Amino acid sequence: MANKQKILVVDDESDIVELISYNLTKEGYQVFTASNGKEGVRIAKEVYPDLIILDVMMPEMDGIEACRIMRSLPEFKQTFMVFLTARSEEYSEIAGFHVGADDYIAKPIKPRALMSRINAILRRNAGEAIDEHVVDKLEISDLVIDRDSFLVFRGQERHVLAKKEFELLYLLASKPNKVFTREQILKAIWEDSVVVTNRTIDVHIRKLREKIGDGYVATVKGVGYKFELD
């Protein structure tokens, strides 16, 4: 059965693009390709993919910068961004999550594992969309957290968050003053992703504080984080 979901593959290695495109097409996805970050941003604005697979190291514009640009645009706030790279240094992973990546997959590519990961990400998104128990809008403290638009309002200010940043804030704010352990946060937001570490949570918390202010998410040393409500 044909799958109408769109996936954009951005990588400067043609053999990698061909391998991924072949397997995605076989799964029924609509596949678009680009050979560098600049071209990837341009095509993304034309086709609005559901998921974008980005290599980190590319000519003209790398994947980190391309992701940063797209995450700054409201139309890509719900788009999944997955990094694909041969680099194993922690810098690549942390830099990717810092600009709003949802996941991180290392080369060499194992088609079956890659397809399993992509299918799981998109299925999870579909499940979230039909969850009747999720409250669409949280009004807490002086914040309005709108799940439909993935926007956060503070007075007259409007804040656009990356998908994982929004999900993390929504999780904490859904139970004010409850302390969520790092393990609970990892399970709720990233599920079984093998590349996510405690450092990833710290990066997302720091980004949240930079965007909405320091007075909302409190650190409980040695345990985790909570949305602080007086």
Image (cartoon, rainbow, N blue to C red):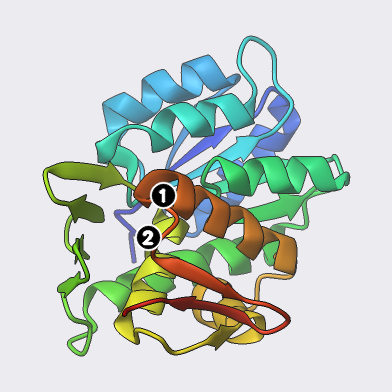
Residue hosting label 1:
162
Residue type at tag 1: Ala
**Left-right relation of 30 to 46:** right
Residues packed near mark 1 inside 10 Å, few (<14), some (14 to 19) or many (20 plus): many
Residue 221 showing in the rendered view: yes
Contact? badges 2 and 1 (CB < 8 Å): yes
- Identify the element where label 1 is drawn: loop
Residue type at tag 2: Phe
Say which mark, if any, is on residue 166: 2
Image quadrant assignment for residue 15: top right
Picture residue at 38% right of the left edge, 23% below the top: 43
Residue 207 % position (x, y): 51, 48
Q: Choose between 137 and 191: the one closer to the eye.
A: 137
Q: Is residue 133 above or below residue 67?
A: below
Residue 22 % position (x, y): 59, 45
For the N terminus, give its image quadrant: bottom left
